[in-house]
Image (cartoon, helix red, strand yellow):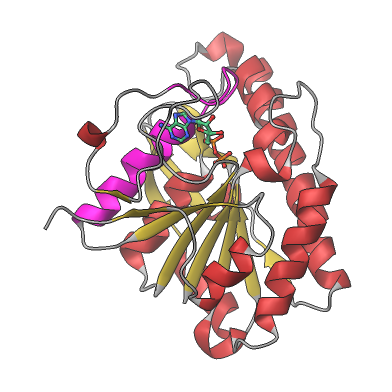
Amino acid sequence: MIILKLGGSILTKKDSLKPEINFKNLNRIVIEITDFLKGYDLKNNGLIIIHGAGSFGHPYAKKYEIGKPFLDSEYPKKRIGFSITHNSVNEFSGVISKCFIENNVPVISIPPSSIIKTSDKRVSYFNLDLIKDYVSQGFLTILYGDVVLDDKLKMAVISGDQILSYLAKNLKFEKIILATDVDGVFNKNPKLYDDAELVEVLKSLEELDSFDSTTNIDVTGGMLGKIQELIELAELGVESMIINAQTPNLIKNALKGIEVKGTLIKSKL
Ligand code: ADP
């Protein structure tokens, strides 16, 4: 089984204050995945795609401060904020699914808010059986960054990266690929420093000089949040790979198991 995470930064105009899809990237990536699937037994091997929320989620989650403690008197505002955020990311996922359907790929997009709960922002409940059932019936299964009910905070945001990490800890995957808008992990933010160097193999956070959150509207941790999840996974013996989804054919080749440029996150041992 393979997990492919498509970053919100690649599928949406992430800095945009209103939801906006990057259709050029979306259409190309859907074609790359469809091409790969022509030689892949989806039913017996399985592919789960997780996509970020990008500009469909972050601006609303930030506006309504989803994930911050609140008073009971604020419930009405929080609830509508939760609804607006969920509806927006759900619609976004629907557009992605539609692209796959147009390419004759059987797809199901499962709203994380319906199958996941958190406790203080970490997964406390996850209906894995449903995911396993869809995968084993041969559906390309899609999950995404969403809002969820939280046992302590009442409501929280769950990132695609945390969903990926939970699945990778609890199911067996041959490949875990994260496609983002840079070549991989650099010793410092490549968007801000021209002399940033790509780290081809990453084993700990200490190997990096500094992190800048992607954009100040990313409510789920940007690259730092992503790497924290992946290093934790590596410590459990699960390797993952970060690649650049802007480079044509990289996703297709990575899915096929061809060696591509990027960062491999593996354990220290
Ligand atoms: P996605 O939306 O694909 O999940 P993010 O936007 O959360 O990805 O994270 C990718 C971004 O992280 C890059 O566009 C880059 O600006 C930023 N970033 C910050 N520090 C680093 C670093 N050390 N190496 C790579 N990217 C970094």
Residue visible at 54% across and 79% down in the picture? 46
Q: Residue furthest right?
A: 102
* Residue in the image at 66% along x and 78% along y: 36
208 and 225: which one is in front?
Answer: 208
Residue 45 visible in the shown view = yes
Q: Position of residue 149 (x, y in %)?
A: 51, 38
Question: Residue 197's image quarter?
Answer: top left
Q: Residue furthest toward the left?
A: 269
Residue at 82 percent of width and 58 percent of height: 27
**Image coords of residue 240 (percent x, y):** 38, 59
161, above or below 115, in the image = above
**Left/right of residue 233 with respect to residue 259 in the rendered view:** left
Q: Nearer the viewer, residue 173 or 130?
A: 173
Left or right for 154, reference 87: left
Residue 99 screen position, x and y as percent: 83, 63
Q: Quadrant of residue 73?
A: top right
In magenta, the rendered stretch is 212-235
Count the numbered circles shown. 0
| Quadrant of the snapshot with the C terminus | bottom left
Side of 32 relative to 158 (left or right): right
Q: Is residue 74 above or below residue 35?
A: above
243 and 80: which is toward the camera = 243
The reply to whether the magenta stretch includes residue 81 is no
Residue 94 in view: no
- Viewer-side residue, 160 vs 84: 160
Instruction: Determine the residue positioned at 25% across, 55% down.
Output: 234
